[in-house]
Image (cartoon, grey):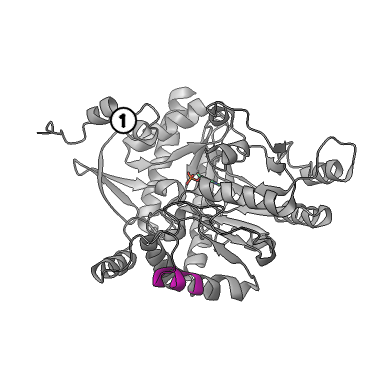
Amino acid sequence: MPPETNSNSLSAFESLESEVRSYSRSFPVVFGKAAGAILEDEKGSKFIDFLSGAGVLNYGHNDTDLLNGLIKYLQSNGIVHGLDMATSAKREFMERFDAILLRPRGLTYKFQFPGPTGANAVEAALKLARKATGRNTVISFTNGFHGVSLGALAVTGNRYYRDAAGLPLVGVVFMPYDGYFGADQDTSEYLDKVLSDASSGVDLPAAIILETVQGEGGINSASKEWLQSVERLCRKHGILLIVDDIQAGCGRTGSFFSFDFAGLSPDIIVLSKSLSGFGLPLSLLLLKPELDVWQPGEHNGTFRGNNLALVTATAALQKYWTDEKLSQGVLEKGRIISERLRQMAQNSRDHRLSVRGRGMMLGLDCGTGKLAGKIARKAFEGGLIVERCGAEDQVIKLLPPLTIDGETLRRGLDILEISVHQVSKMTS
Ligand code: PLP
């Protein structure tokens, strides 16, 4: 007989689960249910979710239409697992994605389904770029985060994660991201200079990999001009441009791809997190057809192209991306959130607070991890789930579901405001 469990008791997690667990430490209750923007613990306490599975739940928890479609598919004996065999669910997804998102943008890509995690998609992108160009190195940026498997970790900046590799992380050169030296220095000029100078010591890389808004790195958003300069210099030097849209993509910044506002045409796009729309694991590489130099099965994995996730992903495209409603809502709610954050920063006695980000990918930079930690803990006590990010965990990251209703959004922001106020009163 298993031991009886106490509602909300974390003892099983403390005794049985590895020390590597993280979110269960920040939010120490046992969650049982969720719907929309609300998570509920085993005791029935409700929390407003501004974390959204770290960007996985852009359409909220258990979207009813996606759920019903999934149940119908399962009840019809639809294929659940099929390795990377051709299935009706995969065909439907590729055809709808092409018709709804790619063709209207004049984009032509081939689809590659790697293993279902973001990190595996990044691994595949890096391998493909090296194979297609015959070059070894990749350029990544300060504060970039691309996952924690060895290849993805090599292009991730944060020392905390890098130190856990246990092996040298090679084949990457880090360059300063937009704004790294402050607003008045264009770091793309430096990048162009070292790539143009045959004596700079920087080899011509296979690819440049970037996030248009760095999620884990602290909600650092690159400007349109900087992104366009990086794309231009990729073309000039024959370097592939990989956009990691795992966190910033799928509508988070207002349009489906986070680079739409800059009109980029990346050679490889990496998507995961909210792609299935339902929290089911699914990753995708979009690659320019001429880069498709793979041999069959060269990058493989048992769980490529999760059919259940493909079913919900297709339903999400159909529901949210065939008109402008969701996009407009994201821009409107993004303005409301950033305005409220600006007021919180202004009214706070702590003048280190500032606002960062774009669309509904926003952050309140608290200057120190200690202050941000206190505010996030207070917010949790008040019924709001928010995560921290940045090199020192100094930024409170706000990723509410894009579909959150106005009233719940306002309540969540009220809790955050009260928390900022209470903590800054205690520390001043
Ligand atoms: N790339 C970006 C931009 C991410 O934010 C993440 C995860 O947070 C990853 C890659 C890694 O994805 P996964 O955790 O699914 O391996």
Confirm whether the magenta stretch covers residue 341. no
Quadrant (top left, top right, bottom left, bottom right) of the N terminus: top left
Q: Residue at x 69, y 38 (%)?
A: 172
- Left or right for 7, reference 320: left
Q: Position of residue 307 (x, y in %)?
A: 38, 63
Per the picture, the main secondary structure of the magenta-coloured stretch is helix
Q: Residue furthest left?
A: 1
| Nearer to us in this view, 111 or 39 | 111
Q: Position of residue 19 (x, y in %)?
A: 37, 26
Quadrant assignment, res 422: top left
Q: Disc count in the image?
A: 1
Ligand 1 lies under 8 Å from the Cβ of mark 1? no
Is label 1 in a helix, a strand or a loop? loop
- Left or right for 60, reference 329: left
Q: Which residue bears the numbered disc 1? A: 17
- Left or right for 57, reference 112: left
Residue bounds of the magenta highlight = 86-95
| Nearer to us in this view, 391 or 276 | 276
| Nearer to us in this view, 345 or 110 | 110
2 w.r.t. 204: above or below: above
Q: Residue at x 46, y 72 (%)?
A: 91
| Nearer to us in this view, 348 or 257 | 257
Q: Position of residue 230 (x, y in %)?
A: 75, 52
142 w.r.t. 109: above or below: above
Q: Position of residue 273 (x, y in %)?
A: 46, 52
- Left or right for 203, reference 59: right
Q: Residue at x 52, y 38 (%)?
A: 149
